[in-house]
Amino acid sequence: MTLPRKELFDLPEGVVYLDGNSLGPLPKGAAERAARVIEAEWGGELIRAWNTAGWMSLPERVGNRIARLIGAPEGSVATGDTLSIKVYQALAAALKMRPERRVILSDSGNFPTDLYMAQGLIDLIGKDHVLRTPAPEDVAAAIADDVAVVMLTEVDYRTGRKHDMQAITRLARANGAVMIWDLAHSAGALPVDLTASGAEFAVGCTYKYLNGGPGAPAFIYARPDLIEKVQPALAGWMGHDAPFAMELGYRPAMSTERLRVGTPPIVQLSILDAALDLWDEVDMEELRAASLALSELFIAEVEARCPALRLASPREPGQRGSQVSFRFEHGYAAMQALIDRGVIGDFRAPDIMRFGFTPLYLDSADVLAAARAIADVIDNRLWADPKYRTKSRVT
């Protein structure tokens, strides 16, 4: 595939969209797919559509399409529910695999919901488990023989700093710990090879780089050789080996499907399925090279034009994901002024202006236009306008 492919997306005229790391844009064909599901399948087939339109097998089919993008075999990825639920499932299963250990190891840069889920699970279990969160650069040294689970997000949501998946997983396994990777900022952004890593579990969302839309379902990966040992903490009927047998006792499916919980969100899954069509021709190595080229250009242009902004992301390209962040004391107001001028990024407390680079719909001209707009906002103190200082609920 020749990049970019702007014609594959419905993007507003006059907008440079640098926030696909938070919510991907609408792929062409996705709205039509949703309308067909609602009008023809639900409207025309009613409940028969579970069979006639293939609704029941849709979570598995979508999971297999995601598997290809994260270096996993078919049948190893289940879809549905939210990322928070998938984190909880993976953590609970991992702790059961190491009953003699009491430490969950993460890092202080992890996405808050992952840490909330870990602490909530610890409180529920009530067996003296602890959550340790050293600085990201100190994680490797903290992996010891008392650690039950290492749970990390590969790419930091604020700075884009990237963990070395292969090296950390090797270290975790050498010390007898179960490895869980959160791929929220990796899937669809850079090459991932779960099979080569040997990690036991991985989770991720699909509304960022995979463009599944707001509220798109999450996914969970379990290493195939472990699946029959996984004991689901949330034993929902869709994870049962025969859901419509309506048995009173839970009997888990003999596949990754045991990690499904409730009724799948068919409309959202259908939108995601349509969005994944464009990935059939994408070479992830080519995508990664293009992403780094765009981000390198962006860093050079912004630093040359805006010395008041300080790079928060790693300077070494291979050490970051597909985003670039800058620190600025008035970052929130500056971002609102920038959005007002057609360049959309986002803000993360306390002072980070965050920009995502997706070569599927961005090119060097977009990067240069964004850098010029940032310079205009900073040099002319456009951020000082009081209207940009009132914070919205979503930043």
Image: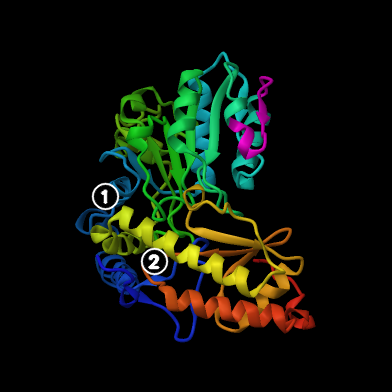
Checking the image for residue 352, the label placed there is: none
- Residue 105 is a magenta residue: no
Identify which residue, 251 or 255, lies in the foreground: 255
- Residue 133 is a magenta residue: yes
- Residue 272 showing in the rendered view: yes
Could you say where residue 171 lies in the image, as x and y percent from the top left?
Answer: 49, 25
Q: Give the amino acid type for the residue marked by disc 1 in the picture.
A: Arg
Give the residue drawn at x 33%, y 38%.
257
Reading the image, the residue beneath label 1 is 61
Residue found farthest to the top: 100
Could you say where residue 55 lies in the image, as x and y percent from the top left?
Answer: 28, 54
Q: CB of mark 2 within 8 Å of CB of mark 1?
A: no
Residue at disc 2, secondary structure: loop
Q: Give the amino acid type for the residue marked by disc 2 in the picture.
A: Pro
Estimate how packed mark 2 is, as few (under 14), some (14 to 19) or many (20 or more) residues with alpha carbons within 10 Å: many
Of the image marks 2 and 1, the number of the one nearer the N terminus: 1
Q: On screen, 179 above or below 183? A: above
Quadrant the C terminus occupies = bottom right
Residue 52, quarter of the rendered image: bottom left
Number of numbered discs on residues: 2
Residue extent of the magenta highlight: 126-139
Give the residue drawn at x 38%, y 29%.
198
Reading the image, the residue beneath label 2 is 359
Could you say where residue 337 lies in the image, as x and y percent from the top left?
Answer: 67, 80
Is residue 123 rendered to the left or right of residue 293?
A: right
Q: On screen, 296 above or below 248? A: below
Identify which residue, 86 or 336, lies in the foreground: 336
Quadrant the N terminus occupies = bottom left
**Circle nearer the viewer, 2 or 1:** 2
Q: What whole-number distance in Å separates the C-alpha atoms at marks 2 and 1?
A: 26 Å
